[in-house]
Amino acid sequence: MFRKWMQATTSAALLSIVFASLVLAQCEFGSTRILNSCLATTGVQTMTASSSGYADASRAFNRRFSYRPASIVYPKTKDQVSLVVKCAAAAKAPVVARSGGHSYAAYGLGGQDGALVVDLSSMKSISVDQSTGLAVSQTGNRLGDLAQYIWDNGRRALPHGTCPYVGTGGHAAYGGFGLYGRTAGLLLDRVVSAEVVTANGTVVTASAQSHSDLFWAIRGAAPSYGIVTAWTFNTLPAPASLVNYWYTFSSSLSNDQAVKIIQAFMNFAASKPTKQLQCVANIG
């Protein structure tokens, strides 16, 4: 009798799981259908799971992760970003912006299936005000694009990472550590304002004077509060000259020798050398 009861209970539990899974899948399908129907009215280039380039467009930088976005859109203006965000809100679909797409956790694809990916690669305008040194850069630009432009237009510079292919959207939003950091801080520290599309599709300019609470939040957690479509940076005069030097140690060092070298490097770095000096240790 007990065995029959257990079999009946197990069968009922399995049926409940299957039913719940079917309901969830149906809801996701319905959300995607509503989303894509709305996106079709915006005039924004859209890629869905049935598009020929979808596999490449949805491939994560870190191949350990594989997610299937509901759609990938390629807006060219802030107003188009606003339109697609409103579509996602109507469909109750999660939204994520992709600037360079180098997130190791694949957050540029939403970190889950079913997200709307707003690819900003078509938004690459940059300008520099020669009188103030302020640079306005849309977040489709990579670090290399930004660094080269401000150098070519006034010999200006910003603190940031060394990889030219990293997107400026996430790099500035999360900090932006680089070799110029001891002198000029993080890239985030040079942000004076941002053009932001909020969750309801409203476009605002956030700064210390306007929407200051949002300005505080996006400098470190921008993806949780909106899509930054353009940063305004306070650039610096580029250094007149740079000196690079390095020490290379033999791979045949003993463990004791290697430990002493690392300790000496750490002691030197902790001795507060001049801010113009940046120290980097590569081990391996």
Image (cartoon, rainbow, N blue to C red):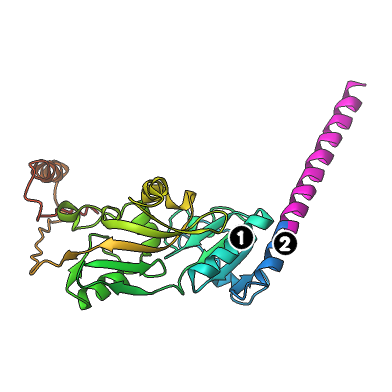
- 47 or 63, which lies in front? 47
* Residue 103: image tag: none
For disc 2, the neighbor class at 10 Å (few under 14, some 14 to 19, many from 20) is some
Whether 220 is among the magenta residues is: no
**Residue sitting at x 61%, y 72%:** 47
Q: In which quadrant of the rendered image does the C terminus lie?
A: bottom left
**Count of numbered marks:** 2
* Residue 86: image tag: 1
Circle 1: element type: helix
The percent position of residue 237, horizontal first and vertical second, equals 14, 66
**Amino acid at circle 2:** Ile
Q: Which residues are magenta?
A: 1-30
In this rendering, is residue 100 above or below 177?
below
In this rendering, is residue 152 above or below 27?
below
Q: CA distance from mark 2 to mark 1?
A: 12 Å
Quadrant housing residue 113:
bottom right
**Amino acid at circle 1:** Lys
The percent position of residue 131, horizontal first and vertical second, equals 19, 70
Asked if residue 59 lies left or right of residue 183, the reply is right
Q: Are marks 2 and 1 in contact (CB under 8 Å)?
A: no
Quadrant housing residue 110:
bottom right
Q: Nearer the viewer, mark 2 or mark 1?
A: 1
Could you tell me what secondary structure mostly forms the magenta stretch? helix
- 183 or 41, which lies in front? 41
In this rendering, is residue 33 above or below 22?
below
The percent position of residue 271, horizontal first and vertical second, equals 7, 41
Circle 2: element type: helix
Q: Earlier in the sequence, mark 2 or mark 1?
A: 2
**Residue sitting at x 30%, y 57%:** 191
| Residue 106 visible here | no
The residue that mark 2 highlights is 34
